[in-house]
Image (tube, helix red, strand yellow):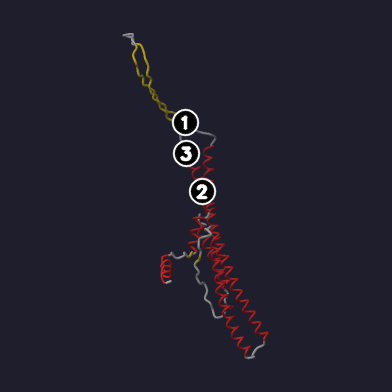
Amino acid sequence: MKKYLTIALFIGILAPAQKVWTLQDCLDYAVENNITVKKTVLDKTTAQLNYQQQKNNKLPTIYGSSSLGLTNGSSIDPITSSFVNQNILSNSFGISGNMTIYQGNKLNLQIEQNKMILDQSSLYQKQAENNIVLNVLEAYLQSLYYYEGIEIAKYTANSSAQELKLTQTKYKNGAISKLELADVETQNAQNQYTVVSSQNLYNQQVLKLKQLLELDPSVDFEIKKKRRFPILTKPFLINSRSLLWQQKIFLILKFTMHRMKF
């Protein structure tokens, strides 16, 4: 038994720690691996090649050719009148070229057209990057919001559990009625359910973020949880929703201004 326990501990030490994804990790990964962004990058590359080819069409075209021939045969020697074998070597060279002087300004217009297509492709790429950044940012901050909801729900549930114990003691001593005890029990059950519901909301939001990143389903995914607001002694005084949404709007505007620099 000790042998297996030692092996298990050794494997646990050697096993790599699960990566915890920060907001910046998610944004960088999304921009680099998103399929829509990759497609816009390929479109931009194609537009760049077409634009360069269109500019090259204004350059002259030059063709060159060469040939070499060897002929072997018999001929009559004019002096001796006898047949002799003779090898004849021949070669030829050629060069030609053409250049469009004027074609109704067609080449210049085609160059301008391809330049506009290239600029348009660059804008589409930036738009795709901005869209995925905003979507990931919103999903990540929403996950943090739900995580804060779990913390608040747990604190409220713990408080109600302590209140339930105190109420049960009062009921045993005859200080309160059965109806009052039932109200506290109902509230405690509701608070316990809120904890489970908050955890489900958080898990669903993290799954949504994972789908946005287009990660493989087998990849373990966990985001970095950082407490944004202190847990006070009175949970009902915490207005974390409004504070987090204010911070969310600020970060979205900040990242939008940063990414929208064309």
Location of residue 22 in the rendering, given as x and y in whole percent from the top left corner = 48, 64
Which disc is residue 42 wearing?
2
**Residue lying farthest right?**
179
> Residue 57 at x, y = what percent?
49, 37
Q: Is residue 88 left or right of residue 43?
A: left
- The quarter holding residue 72 reads top left
Under circle 1, the secondary element is: strand
Which is closer to the viewer, label 2 or label 3? 2
Between marks 1 and 2, how big is the CA–CA gap? 33 Å
Q: Which amino acid does the dot numbered 2 rest on?
A: Leu
> Is label 2 in contact with label 3 (beta carbons under 8 Å)?
no
163 up-or-down from 36: above or below: below
Q: Dot 1: few (<14), some (14–19), or many (≥20) neighbours within 10 Å?
A: few
Q: Which mark is residue 98?
A: 1
Which x, y percent locates residue 192? 60, 76
Q: Residue lying furthest left in this view?
A: 80
260 above or below 161? above
Residue bearing mark 3: 56
Q: Which mark is residue 152?
A: none
Q: CA distance from mark 1 to mark 3?
A: 13 Å
Residue at the image point whose x is 55% and y is 67% from the top: 143
SS for dot 3: helix
Q: Left of 60 or right of it: where is 205?
A: right
Identify residue type, mark 3: Asn
